[in-house]
Amino acid sequence: MIVVGCLSSAVGMLYMKLSSEVGEASLPLCQRWRWAVGFVLLVVNATAFDIIAYGMTPLSMIAPFAGLTIVFSSLLAWTGLLTKREQLTPSGAAATVLVIGGITGVSVFGPRGDGSPSVLRLTADSVALVAAAFGLVAVWLILRRTRLAPPHSSWLMTIASSTTSACCGLVTQVALKQISGTVVTSVMAGSTRAWSDPLTWGSFVAIGL
């Protein structure tokens, strides 16, 4: 389920890129079918798969699999099936192998789900970590609009952008895990009391941002 969700995200991003390549931006929104397909695959479809997977699998096992989206995107772009064919550089191929090796290591030696629902219980430390990630992203976005931002071609820009992107991924994964846990708890208990948790509604806001 996690792998299918990552593949859906990758195909969705490529469809949205294809929309840009063929000039759909000049068309009315209702005629941008490639963009619409990409949006459904990237947001609706992938999120649905993720909520199911996050409800049944420990977060520590799911997190590394997010790298599969990058792997699928790189390989699909290299084949040229959906967009203009892109060359896979030696460094890109090495990074792809490294990601696959890391995911394989987690699958073999990492924690395993037993098929029962896996509900996340956020502690004060967890909330503080998510808040810190939000703060780091906000600071970076502000800095990028000032003269303090490093040049686009500098290594500092690469590191800062990668770090803030990872922070966004952390927030998204924790938020999805919280929401999926609420869904699972509601279904198992047969009531809507779990939806009264403010952290669940805060998770929706975090994903929206």
Image (tube, helix red, strand yellow):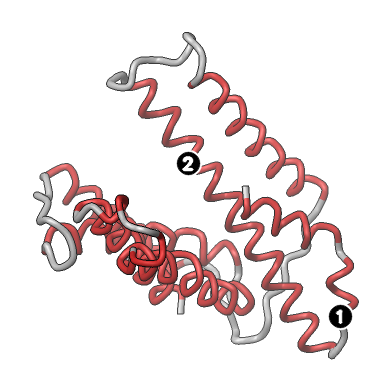
Q: Which residue is mark 1?
A: 192
Location of residue 65 by image quarter: bottom left
Q: Position of residue 31 (x, y in %)?
A: 34, 66
Secondary structure at numbered mark 1 = loop
Answer with left or right where residue 188 lies relative to residue 156: right
Answer with left or right where residue 102 lies relative to residue 134: left
The structure residue drawn at horizontal position 30% and vertical position 61%, both measured from the top left corner, is 100
Per the rendering, the mark at residue 165 is 2
What amino acid is at disc 2?
Ser
Eye-nearest disc, 1 or 2? 1
* Above or below, comparing residue 8 to residue 126 in the picture: below
Q: Quick one: label 1 or label 2, which is nearer the N terminus?
A: 2
Residue 118 visible in the shown view: yes
What amino acid is at disc 1?
Thr
Location of residue 155 by image quarter: top left
Q: Position of residue 115 (x, y in %)?
A: 60, 86
